[in-house]
Amino acid sequence: MSKNDKVSNSVIRRLPRYYRFLGELISEGVSKISSRELAERMNVTASQIRQDLNCFGGFGQQGYGYNVSELRSEIGEILGIDRDHPAVLIGAGNLGRALSVHLDYAKYGCRLCGIFDSSETLVGMRLGQLTVSPMSALAGFCEKYKPVIAILCIPKEAAPEVCEQLASLGIKAFWNFSHYDISLENISDVVIENVHLGDSLMALCYGISKNEKDKENSVPEENGNEEA
Ligand code: NAI
């Protein structure tokens, strides 16, 4: 059994946040931290932290706390951030352009090595260190550079065909912004991460309306008394 197999999916989902906070601690010169202090910083319970981080064993010691740098390296290794996964971005429209130039891929274990679009107007456009290539060059590119991640920033309607093509070209992971529910027949070892920024916004709206409702419900009955 590998180390990753021991860690539940819900813990894995929380790891990037730990990784980020531990990085901030390192840049502040903090070398060890207790679960209580880390919990306060992260606004979670200390027991949650202990449970999550116990999965990695050996980093937390009673009365000592966690070795920040070792724990961060361990989490980075589990997340695969210490590697260099080559990625291609498909769709150099508004979203694709933003993701091409504003994300530090190396920080997350990736390397953006190609950008592709079907629009002749966009082909040849310089985006950071890369130039947008035509879709006709995708197969040759994949054969040569062997990207494993595809970042999908194309319309939903275009996604099914492009996904099939990418999978047949050896893509093993889709970071999918296209709103298309990817289903790839006969392919089992592909990882899909669907991103819907709108979901996060809806969670925010829920938070606002909940606060408003709570406030309404806690209003004292002064108005009613005045009318009486
Ligand atoms: P956009 O229209 O600016 O860009 C789409 C790009 O895809 C265009 O450059 C177009 O030429 C290219 N394209 C279309 N068909 C293609 C194909 N078969 N092969 C290669 N390239 C192709 O749209 P925008 O604003 O960049 O959004 C892209 C997609 O992402 C949209 O479908 C949008 O709904 C979605 N989106 C998703 C978000 C999310 O949170 N998941 C957030 C924002 C947008």
Image (cartoon, grey):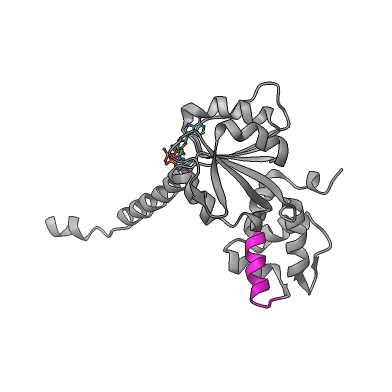
Q: Residue at x 43, y 39 (%)?
A: 121
Quarter of the figure that contains the C terminus? bottom left
Q: From this viewpoint, is residue 172 visible?
A: no
59 displayed left or right of 95? right
Main SS, magenta region, reads: helix
**Front-lying residue, 213 or 97:** 97
Question: Looking at the image, is 208 positioned above or below residue 69?
Answer: above
Quarter of the figure that contains the N terminus? top right
Q: Residue at x 62, y 27 (%)?
A: 165
Quadrant in which residue 182 is drawn = top right
Quadrant in which residue 88 is drawn = top right
Question: Looking at the image, is 186 positioned above or below residue 195?
Answer: above
Q: Residue furthest right?
A: 1
Q: From this viewpoint, is residue 45 visible?
A: yes
145 displayed left or right of 40? right
Quadrant in which residue 162 is drawn = top right
Q: Residue furthest left?
A: 227
Boundaries of the magenta span: 18-30
Q: Residue at x 50, y 44 (%)?
A: 124
- Check residue 147 for magenta coloring: no
**Whole-percent x, y for residue 36 in the image:** 66, 69
**Whole-percent x, y for residue 5 in the image:** 80, 43
Q: Residue at x 68, y 31 (%)?
A: 169
